[in-house]
Image: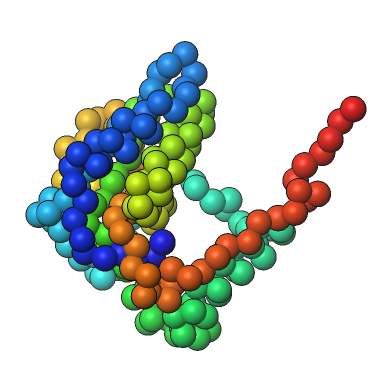
Amino acid sequence: MRAFRADPVARADIEALLAVACRAPSGTNLQPWQVHVLTGASRQGLVDAVCAAYDADAPGHEPEYDYYPAEFFEPYLSRRRKIGWGLYGLLGIARGDDARMRAQMRRNYEFFGAPVGLIFSIDRRMGRGGWLDYGMFLQNLMLAARARGLDTCPQVAWLPYHRIIGQRLGFAAHEQLVCGMCLGYADPAAVENSLVTERAALGEFVSFHG
């Protein structure tokens, strides 16, 4: 979901979701996740700080890890383009309309209007297995939210602003940003929420042996 109503989410509900999420399995039960829950003035403070940096478009904002490949190749390039232009098409953003594309990107840093912003971090000393475990934790959280009538949007867009985020949230020296997430009630009137992504057929990624 990429547009949310302003309706608040009760703290008890947030805690219940996280209690479900943390039942995710992890190697030798390391439980590598750390969660920062932002609401009210804390949420708005981070939004304002990161939006200001985004608007300034100054150099020096680089992510700490590569979420995407350095160069996209097929079939991943086509999949990326399809969802991108599918979203822009719904919003009436034409190719070459850089100003509106940039404005839409900026909405990430407003948590798409969601009243709850979640920032996830990990101890940077963890191995790759911890990051795999983290994915299960995030999926648990998203499914639990949907079961309670809430919606989410996981966001890699926050990664370039890890220094601002770390300073505002008091990250420890070993703490590394993983991603962000919006949590709230999706706006059913927002056209962007009607986007349905496609999935590859099983034959494209499954091999049966035996």
**Residue drawn where x is 26% and y is 70% of the image:** 55
Quarter of the image with the C terminus in it: top right
Q: Position of residue 159 (x, y in %)?
A: 37, 50
Q: Is residue 30 visible?
A: yes
Q: Position of residue 193 (x, y in %)?
A: 43, 68
Identify the image quadrant of the N terminus: bottom left
Residue 66, above or below 88: above
Any part of residue 63 in sight: no
In the rendered structure, the answer to whether residue 133 lies left or right of residue 188 reads: right
**As drawn, which residue projects farthest toward the top?**
28
Q: Residue at x 43, y 72 (%)?
A: 192
Kindly indicate the quadrant of the structure image that contains residue 105.
Answer: bottom left
Looking at the image, residue 67 lies above or below residue 73:
above
Q: Residue 73's spot in the image, x, y percent? A: 68, 58
User: Is 6 situated above or below 140?
Assistant: below
Q: How is the image coloured?
A: rainbow
Extreme left residue here?
41
Q: Is residue 11 left or right of residue 17?
A: left
* Furthest residue toward front: 148
User: At x 82% / y 38%, what residue is drawn?
Assistant: 207
Comparing 21 with 62, the one in front is 21
Does 139 sit left or right of 180 as displayed?
A: right
Which of 134/188 is in front? 188
Q: How many marks?
A: 0
Depth check, front residue: 166 or 208: 208
Residue drawn at the location 44% of the way across and 80% of the way down: 91
Where is residue 70? Give x, y as percent: 57, 53
